[in-house]
Image (cartoon, rainbow, N blue to C red):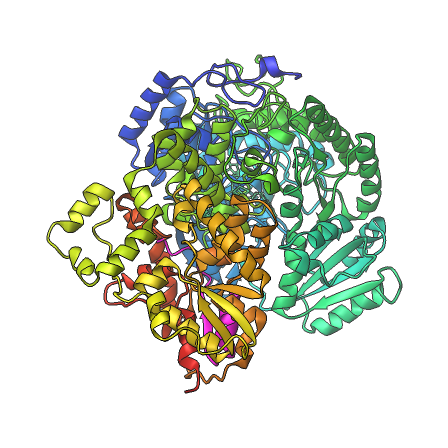
Amino acid sequence: MAVEDEFYDPTGLETSATGLSTARPDDERYAALAADLREQVAGEVQFDEYAQVLYATDGSIYQARPAGVVLPRGIADVQATVEIASSYDLPILPRGTGSSLAGQTVGNGCVVIDFTKYMDDIVAVDTDARRATVQPGVVQDHLDERLARDGLQFAPDPASSNRATIGGGIGNNSTGAHSVRYGITDAYTEELQVVLADGSLIHTREVVLGSDEHDAIVAKDDAEARIYQTVRELVETHEDEIEARFPDLKRSVSGYNLQKVIYENDAGEEVINLSKLFVGSEGTLGVIVEATVSLVTKPDETALALYCFDDLVDAMEAVPEALEFPVSAVELMDDEVFRLARESEGYAEYAEPIPDGTTAALMLEWDNELVDDFGAAVADTNAHFVESGTAFDVLEAYSEADQDQLWKLRKAAIPLLMSLEGDPKPYPFIEDATVPPEELAEYVGKFENVLDTHDTSAAYFAHAGVGTLHIRPILNLKADEGIEKMHSIADDVTDLVVEHHGAFSGEHGDGMARTEFNPKMYGEDIWGAFKQLKTAFDPEWLLNPGNVVYREKASDPGPESDRGVGADMRDHLRYGPEYQSIEPQSELDFDDEGGFSHLVELCNGCGTCRQTDSDVMCPTYRASKEEIQTTRGRANMLRAAISGELGEDEIHSERFQREVLDLCVGCKGCKSDCPTGVDMAKLKAEVKHQYHEENGASLRSRLFGNIDALSALGSRLAPLSNLASSVPGSRRLLERVFGIAPERELPTFRSESFEEWFDRRGGATVSADEADAKVLLFPDTYTNYTYPDAGKAAVDVLEAANVHVRVCDDLEPSGRAAFSTGLLDEATSRARHNVETLRPLVDDGWHVAFIEPSDAVMFQDEYRDLLDGPDVETVAAAAYGVMEYLDLTRADDRLDVDAPAELLTYHGHCNQKATNKDHHAVGVLRRSGYEVDPLDSGCCGMAGSFGYEAEHYDISQAIGRILFRQVEESDGAVVTVPGASCRSQLGDRPGESQPPHPIEKVAEALEE
Ligand SMILES: Cc1cc2nc3c(=O)[nH]c(=O)nc-3n(C[C@H](O)[C@H](O)[C@H](O)COP(=O)(O)OP(=O)(O)OC[C@H]3O[C@@H](n4cnc5c(N)ncnc54)[C@H](O)[C@@H]3O)c2cc1C
Ligand code: SF4
Ligand code: SF4
């Protein structure tokens, strides 16, 4: 690598090809630093190896291990951190969610300042002035949610807005699909509070040049004065070059915003506003601790039209014409995106409406702020594109649902591409190059030649209206050849971009991927100005060195060290030729995922598992706001373990189990919600299994893994068994011996089990001969011994639908509890018995229905990981949740129902949400006559045995409280919940009883 020898390594340690320290960090120095920080900082200070691994990656292809992390509680914490880190001569790296794609949120030996946990408040919203003041860690969607109450929004809308912070958006100068209409973050960043490299705090805002205010600032003898003077001097000295070199684009986020820092304000005065310079500076000029941003009116309505072309270049050529219309977005997708979507289970439905022969599509959006009549606006563009024959078809979307479909297809591009099997992957490194829209078609033609020359391909999707093409060439970065190809493609593409008057980055910033090329884009003069600017703000080059700007040699202006020297996009790669991972011998079948290690490596760091508003993933992060409690955190730790970054056998250490795996509640949310399908519940089960193999399972794991046997005993001894827990001291004993939380209500056993009840009533009342169908009801542990009412209701409903019902009495428990605790031998043996028993019955026309969702999903999904062969597939295909069975077979059409006029609040089971089976209950309840409010809820926090475990009680409650709030906010008169664990969690609320299973509500609706 060209400048590897010169590259600054702040730890003073050798680095491997993957960018990680090959020796363990300088523990003593870091320990002293951490101790100093702990004395001065009210927030959290994490300098252990786990913290270093967790913050060594972001959403990019890069990896570099920091010294540690500070989670500040306020401005004073940030000032203290900057001062102390610089006294140890260590670099400083501010960070939001770390969803950046160019490597600007990782750095060797840096002290990371993570704002997301404590500095995430909305300080003030001034609706009259249309401004909001926020702390940097606030997530953009949270801000927008608050602003929507006043009909306002923060205009830049990155696709990552459900977890990306305002601080990170300012750091990167972020923007999104609506930049055609609104531009980018620098236009909305008005004032900032910034901690400078010397720890001082400045307030940036519009300052009229030559005013008393300005003169007072520059007359001081401090960092602020020096910065104002240098910036003005640089802008004035380089005026002509700035005019010539900065591209005339709606989006250009490469380099520093020298072209925007001095301007004429609304009153016609010449002002300097350093805020504009901090935007897009990627944490290299100062640490933002508060931001005041301007806001726009949120449109009430929008409409979309998708124009279908049979040629990609024709679609590109149509972009400038599309911009002649009053549109708010112009987006592009190509046939590779459609093909991948059609082949994917999760996205096929979105690609269905796309007409055959569509090689590329342009999607245009209008909003009610721009046009009064959507029909007329679309008719105008139809006349232009379709009637003239440029596009061969159009799909119009006016309803929210139809528009949502098309946006989902557009946003599916990255996840679809990233989940490609094998090592070659579509990596981001030239993924946001931007050229003027009128040059797009020609640029794309030449771009294709670059890809051909390098013998690779790519899918095309784009914010076409602003000339930003999201292209990710498919490369294998675990091989030297792939890495060299990446560099060569980047070199060629940056040449092309310069030729077409564009910007290397129009969206995601410079980072480690593009900083190397900035001299090519800006030329010697501006490049020199950038370096002077950096030195004025940060004389020791301590702030995120190596990003946006670098020094060619140590004797260049800057510190008397080699900090900030050199930049090579091939350094610090997460993978590299030396990267190796151990593929463990696994009990579960990982063939579909390409192996255990491939499933771990599928995590690309996008940060979607840090979103907190919808979807199931990830409840433990939602409750804790800890990186280690995200799916990404767990995947990063697993990757560090299997690739040797962590010590040998760390993966089987007690600490790894406790801190990395044990808090994963196994909700499977990530399996469906993670864009690349990192299935942490499965990975956890495998690693826990290996841990048990090596260390033996704890008494409690065995107890919960065999909860069925204990429940059977409890039922036999009821009511005596129920009294046991009220014997003084018994709960403390349970806590001491088994680690069971004393705060938890223990289940109440019924003396007559569900199976016994069914036998006592004489079995089925609808004979097999007369019935329309035959269903085996699975007597799960909860239904059988503690809550037979749900089973009885299921029998009543199925028989009312003329189904012949049998309660299987020769099956074993599903093995769900054993699986969740990693007792895979036990789970496998149960799965084998059940599949062998059921296969002949299924062949004989029986379906198998489950009252407990987690058991249904166990048969449908996990059994296929535990067993091979056609039997398991056949049984899995015949297994249904009971509500799913009614819905899919439409057996409920045969019911005579008349539900009371009642609004039900429905909380679905996370395992069913993860397998897309959660909507069935809602359909059946509605057809039974109920109104239903389905909650957008995740895991309840109970997760089988998890909520009973003493050390997990608090987090279980914290997760539960999120659900409790959602339930309280719903207008439903009754909550209905299929999962037994969720019913216990909700029933444990003071003064509340366990909610009914939805099948009980259907039974209630049956006409007498
Ligand atoms: C799937 C995916 C889609 C994306 N789509 C878009 C898109 O549509 N548009 C877009 O613009 N980007 C997009 N991004 C990139 C990224 O998500 C955005 O740039 C986002 O705004 C970054 O926010 P963050 O909180 O993750 O910031 P981080 O990644 O944590 O930080 C970003 C930069 O800001 C700096 N920074 C953070 N906080 C501060 C602070 N307090 N003071 C000073 N500097 C700070 C950091 O040092 C870093 O250089 C996407 C990323 C992914 C993975
Ligand atoms: S686990 Fe999935 S959602 Fe989370 S960062 Fe990794 S890829 Fe993104
Ligand atoms: S299974 Fe659930 S708790 Fe575990 S990582 Fe995935 S989403 Fe988070």
| Residue 798 seen | yes
Give the quarter of the image for residue 300: bottom right
**Image point (47%, 74%), residue name:** 798
Position of 750 compared to 811: left or right?
left
Can you say whether 942 is above or below 219 in the image?
A: below
- The structure residue drawn at horizontal position 44% and vertical position 78%, both measured from the top left corner, is 765
Q: Nearer the viewer, residue 694 or 400?
A: 694
Q: What is the quadrant of the C terminus in the image?
A: bottom left
Q: Position of residue 557 (x, y in %)?
A: 56, 17
Residue 735, image x and y in percent?
Answer: 21, 45
Q: How many marks?
A: 0
Left or right side of 422 for 796: left
Q: Is residue 263 magenta?
A: no
In the rendered image, the residue lying farthest to the left is 728
Identify which residue, 898 or 149, lies in the foreground.
898
Q: Quadrant of residue 951?
A: top left
Q: Position of residue 169 (x, y in %)?
A: 53, 44
Where does the magenta region start and end?
Answer: 919-942
Left/right placement of residue 803 relative to residue 493 reads left
Answer whether residue 143 is visible to the viewer in this image. no
Membership of 920 in magenta stretch: yes
Q: Looking at this rendering, what residue extends furthest in the right direction? A: 389
Residue 178 vertical position relative to residue 246 in the rendered view, above or below:
below
Residue 763 image point, x, y percent: 41, 73
Quarter containing the N terminus: top right
> Ligand 1 shows up in which quadrant of the image?
top right
